């Protein structure tokens, strides 16, 4: 598979599916929301203790450790989920369109708007308040990470060359052998790149989740996010800097010690038959490769497990008979139909309940929400325009200068994965000091997180403009205007769109936190859908919360369908540089 | 061990005990929503017996790869059945291998691991696995490359790995799907003769070889029996044994005669071969062909062929033409078919003969050539004529591509329909019959597009 845009979130999926599938999925989402909220309300009356968060620098390593553990658990959960989900979707023609529609919608919904109900539900379900919040946070990071991983795995499975599949059939591979020798290796590169994006998104959400408050209730967890928040509220500059420094150190260290070795290692799974010249190098991988123990020990242990398994598998029918690739799916049993019908009924009922809950939304509320939606929409697009406005000239200038690009690009890549949430408190204090409102300030907050994606992709696009085209431009003395309109802008278009799609997702997500904040005892807020979500959370008004969440999801999905998907298709067809 | 289970068919099958794989009336068709169906392969009987190399030869679109996949159990026939030593193939434990055109090696496994993998699937213990694999790697001449990754090897060496992997399971039948067509001429030659040597000296642990190819010489060089397939739908045109002794000499009279004979069969698809006996009639439910099948040739290729032919006095042997151009039949046939369709050329007794209009075409300069091409295409190609008429009839002079694709889908599979459309677009653009706006997927009259551009320039 060809992965030209490493930091692309596969937001824009091309799929065919009837409209009713979307409706069904929407109903499922409503039903899920209702289930979550009704369990949450049950708990809502109970009192709860608050964990004191220290702002002493000496606890920082411990807090960092907590955050990292949360991250790791959430990541591996997402990976396991993604692989299972992708596998089932790819090999079951009947459920495939449904599962892909679900993925498509879920990955465009801003995760953070689900935080309040999920926290409440988890705390209600799990005995022990602390554990409940932990699980809620992990669950939320998980939901932020798993969709694009699942999608990547699914598309990889679908693009395995036919002859490879035929080879695995004719040589009578078991499903186990096929998974480890064909499907996993073939998907490895996509999974690695998407993991990088996922984990970056995970940090963003984690830091926000750790500082979550709801009305008078405080759901803070000891971790980097709450540390930064506490330091900000206490006005402790040293602690604040230390906290932010810790976040950056962790991100850079992850990049150097986890992702780079992984990328270098995954190079062997490249499905091209020629060896490529430029490789990512990683000293750590070299170290591991040269260590005798690391080389032989895992293999020995693995074969201990594997060999008996293969011997047993070889006796099964699966390994003795060649199965046709175009086998028709068998008849579904009536039990399955009954189950599906029952499930559909339950979903309808719960969705109806959720809609009934909306009754309490007054007309005034609705107007407020619509105004908020318009304001947030404008703000998100303003943030996108501003990031495009500065990153295009700068990115192109960097990208056309190869020496500079080699230095800047990795930095931009790392900047894109530093969670903007860590900087929010600082920016907020600045805003308070300057006396500016959040109206403009929230745009700045969105920019903080989104512009790096665009910059990174524009640089990549400028690098990818073939040098012979550039030579043609200078040979025929293109004017500056011609150069930009005929060469540079079309050349970077696919990359720019990729960056913008990712940035737009990030900006919507950021709106939830950027439009409403508690800083140093004061509440900063502006008109916006994100602010409405937060305000509804603070006052425990679930009908408003549901309404606002529905609106934000609807807007994102519509934007994706109407604008981004079309632009993406254009980028894929007309502006694709054939290599 | 489990291989032996199925190799004792003496009890069940009547006289033809030796037959390893037998296909009875297998066919392939796609059902269309509108009742009629697209026949890809007509009902066919075929059997693979021990001791022979069987070559399946045919132009592209004759379904030879599909045939191979049905015979190996990778694809289920729409009707009919395949038997492995008398048992239906999906109940039998078959022991075959395929050598693929694209090699289909796993790039993340080393040469040794690639060869070992099929044995692993059969539960062979590690030590024995290694030993058998190493022996096979030695046999194909890859000694010393066990630890290399496929991408470090040349194409020919990769296909050797493909052979080693196929042979390591000691298959009863070795299937080969155009195994040499991704290789350069010299490498392919070399590999072919080595394969033949392994086969004739019985070093190779297989009972029969089934070769799918579109290379006539390759088939005549290797096979003991050749089956020639025809197109629309795929069917057996002729089936004959080759009695030439190995090694065969390409220059020998008997050899070239055989090649020439196959050319004649292939270039006269209209002459019906003797009907296969014992066929249940009226299975083909195909609606009468509305559109002719456009050969996928470029106008430039047609012009080139005609000019070459004119250079040689307007008539030449097809076999010589292909040989001189270093073309295989898959390269040459579409061009010949296209020229024939346009009335520029005729095929007589395996010779290509230029017609007067073809002569005029070849002698003209480019603009006149386009005009002649346009006239010939509009006269002879229904699809192009229809597109042009639709464009003329509509007031805005544009028509969506989908409209014609739907019509084509009635008659061709979706994939072939799109290919037909692509070829039609190439021809139409060349002959200035219409223009095609690829961004909007619409056909446009050439003048209409000019006007649009002019309007756009005025506006800016």
Image (cartoon, rainbow, N blue to C red):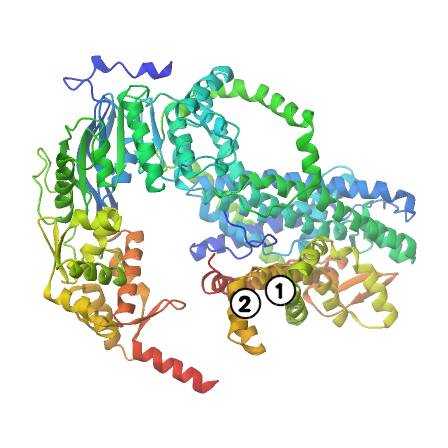
How packed is label 2: few (under 14 Cα within 10 Å), some, or many (20 or more)?
A: some
Q: Residue at 79% across / 48% down in the picture?
A: A249
Asked whether, in this view, residue A407 is left or right of residue B322, the answer is right
Residue drawn where x is 8% and y is 47% of the image: B271
Tag 1: Cα neighbours inside 10 Å, few (<14), some, or many (≥20)? Answer: many
Q: Which residue is mark 2?
A: A470
A57 to B385, vertically: above or below: above
Chain letter for mark 2: A
Q: Report the front residue among A393 and B320.
A: B320
Query: Residue A481 vs residue A415: left or right?
Result: left
Nearest the eye: A284 or A434: A284
Residue B287 position in % (x across, y down): 16, 52
- Do we see residue B12 in this rendering? yes
Asked whether disc 2 touches disc 1, contact meaning CB atoms under 8 Å apart, the reply is yes
| Mark number, residue B295 | none
Determine the image quadrant of residue A394.
bottom right
Question: Label 1 belongs to which residue?
Answer: A400
* SS under mark 2: helix
Percent coordinates x, y for residue A278 in the rendering: 59, 48
Q: Secondary structure at mark 1?
A: helix
Left or right position of B232 against B92? left
Viewer can see residue A365: no
- Which quarter of the figure has residue A515? bottom right
Where is B91 relative to B274, above or below?
above
Residue B165 position, x and y percent, is 41, 27
Q: Are marks 2 and 1 on the same chain?
A: yes
Chain of the residue displaying label 1: A
The CA span between labels 2 and 1 is: 10 Å
């Amino acid at each position: 598979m060809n992965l030209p845009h490493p930091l692309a979130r596969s937001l824009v999926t091309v799929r065919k599916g009837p409209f009713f599938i979307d409706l069904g999925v929407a109903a499922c989402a409503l039903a899920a929301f209702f289930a979550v909220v009704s369990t949450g309300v049950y708990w809502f009356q109970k009192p709860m203790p608050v964990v004191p968060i220290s702002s002493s620098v000496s606890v920082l390593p411990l807090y960092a450790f907590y955050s990292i553990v949360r991250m790791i658990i959430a990541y591996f959960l997402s990976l396991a989920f993604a692989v299972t989900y992708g596998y089932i979707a790819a090999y079951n023609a009947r459920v495939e369109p449904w599962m892909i529609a679900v993925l498509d919608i879920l990955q465009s919904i801003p995760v953070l708007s689900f935080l309040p109900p999920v926290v409440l539900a988890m705390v209600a379900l799990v005995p022990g308040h602390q554990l409940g919040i932990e699980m809620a946070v992990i669950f939320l990071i998980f939901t932020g990470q798993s969709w694009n991983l699942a999608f990547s795995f699914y598309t990889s499975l679908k693009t395995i060359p036919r002859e490879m599949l035929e080879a695995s059939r004719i040589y009578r591979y078991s499903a186990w052998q096929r998974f480890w020798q064909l499907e996993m290796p073939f998907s490895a590169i996509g999974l690695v790149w998407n993991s990088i994006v996922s984990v970056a998104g995970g940090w963003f959400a984690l830091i926000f989740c750790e500082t979550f408050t709801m009305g008078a209730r405080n759901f803070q967890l000891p971790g980097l996010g709450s540390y930064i928040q506490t330091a900000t509220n206490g006005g402790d500059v040293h602690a604040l800097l230390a906290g932010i420094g810790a976040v950056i150190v962790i991100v850079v260290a992850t990049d150097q010690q986890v992702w780079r070795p992984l990328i270098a290692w995954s190079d062997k799974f490249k499905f091209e038959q020629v060896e490529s010249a430029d490789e990512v190098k990683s000293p750590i991988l070299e170290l591991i490769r040269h260590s005798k123990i690391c080389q032989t020990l895992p293999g020995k242990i693995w074969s201990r497990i594997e060999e008996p398994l293969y011997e047993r598998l070889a006796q099964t029918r699966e390994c003795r008979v060649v199965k046709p690739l175009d086998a028709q799916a068998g008849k579904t049993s009536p039990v399955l139909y009954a189950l599906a019908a029952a499930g559909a009924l339950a979903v309808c009922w719960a969705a109806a309940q959720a809609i009934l809950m909306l009754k309490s939304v007054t007309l005034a509320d609705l107007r407020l929400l619509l105004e908020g939606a318009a304001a947030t929409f404008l703000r998100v697009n303003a943030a996108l325009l501003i990031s495009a406005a500065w990153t295009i000239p700068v990115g192109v200038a960097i990208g056309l200068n190869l020496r500079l690009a080699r230095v800047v690009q990795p930095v931009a890549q790392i900047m894109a994965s530093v969670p903007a949430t860590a900087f929010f408190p600082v920016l907020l204090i600045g805003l308070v000091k300057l006396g500016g409102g959040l109206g403009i300030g929230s745009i700045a907050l969105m920019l903080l997180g989104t512009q790096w994606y665009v910059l990174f992709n524009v640089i990549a696009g400028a690098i990818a403009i073939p040098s012979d085209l550039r030579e043609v431009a200078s040979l025929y003395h293109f004017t500056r205007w011609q150069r930009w309109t005929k060469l540079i802008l079309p050349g970077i278009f696919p990359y720019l769109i990729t960056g913008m799609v990712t940035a737009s997702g990030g900006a919507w997500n950021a709106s939830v936190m950027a439009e409403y904040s508690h800083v140093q005892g004061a509440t900063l807020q502006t008109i916006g859908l994100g602010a409405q979500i937060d305000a509804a959370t603070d006052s425990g008004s679930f009908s408003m919360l549901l309404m606002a969440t529905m609106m934000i999801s609807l807007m994102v999905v519509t934007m994706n369908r109407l604008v981004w998907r079309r632009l993406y298709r254009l980028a894929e067809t007309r502006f694709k540089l054939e290599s | 061990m489990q291989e032996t289970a199925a190799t004792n068919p003496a009890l069940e099958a009547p006289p033809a005990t030796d037959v390893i794989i037998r296909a009875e009336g297998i066919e392939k068709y796609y059902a269309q929503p509108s009742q009629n169906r697209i026949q890809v392969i007509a009902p066919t009987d075929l059997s693979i017996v021990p001791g022979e190399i069987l070559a399946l030869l045919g132009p592209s679109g004759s379904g030879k790869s599909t045939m191979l996949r049905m015979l190996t159990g990778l694809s289920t026939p729409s009707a009919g059945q395949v038997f492995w030593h008398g048992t239906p193939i999906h109940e039998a434990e078959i022991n075959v291998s395929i050598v693929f055109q694209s090699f289909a090696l796993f790039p993340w496994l080393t040469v040794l691991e690639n060869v070992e993998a099929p044995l692993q699937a059969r539960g062979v213990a590690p030590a024995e696995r290694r030993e058998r694999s190493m022996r096979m790697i030695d046999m194909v001449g890859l000694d010393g490359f066990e630890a290399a990754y496929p991408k470090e090897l040349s194409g020919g060496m990769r296909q050797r790995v493909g052979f080693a992997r196929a042979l390591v399971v000691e298959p009863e039948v070795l299937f080969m799907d155009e195994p040499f067509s991704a290789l350069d001429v010299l490498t392919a030659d070399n590999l072919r003769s080595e394969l033949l040597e392994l086969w004739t000296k019985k070093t190779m642990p297989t009972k029969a070889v089934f070769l799918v190819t579109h290379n006539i010489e390759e088939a005549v060089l290797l096979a003991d029996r050749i089956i020639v397939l025809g197109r629309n739908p795929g069917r057996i045109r002729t089936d004959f044994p080759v009695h030439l002794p190995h090694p065969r000499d390409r220059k020998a009279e008997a050899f070239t005669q055989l090649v020439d004979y196959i050319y004649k069969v292939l270039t006269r698809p209209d002459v019906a071969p003797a009907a296969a006996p014992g066929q249940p009639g009226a299975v083909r439910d195909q609606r009468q062909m509305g559109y002719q099948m456009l050969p996928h040739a470029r106008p430039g290729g047609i012009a080139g062929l005609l000019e070459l032919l004119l250079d040689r006095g307007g008539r030449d042997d097809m076999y010589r033409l292909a040989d001189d151009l270093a073309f295989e039949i898959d390269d040459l046939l579409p061009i010949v078919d296209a020229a024939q369709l346009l009335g520029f050329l005729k095929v007589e007794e395996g010779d290509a003969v230029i017609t007067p209009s073809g002569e005029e075409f070849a002698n003209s300069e480019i603009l006149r050539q386009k005009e002649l091409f346009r006239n010939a295409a509009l006269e002879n190609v229904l699809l192009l004529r229809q597109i042009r008429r639709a464009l003329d009839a509509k007031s805005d002079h544009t028509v969506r591509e989908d409209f014609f694709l739907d019509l084509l889908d009635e008659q061709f599979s979706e994939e072939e329909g799109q290919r037909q459309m692509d070829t039609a677009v190439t021809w139409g653009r060349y002959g200035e019959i219409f223009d095609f706006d690829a961004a909007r997927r619409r056909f446009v009259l050439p003048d209409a597009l000019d006007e649009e551009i002019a309007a756009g320039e005025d506006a800016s």
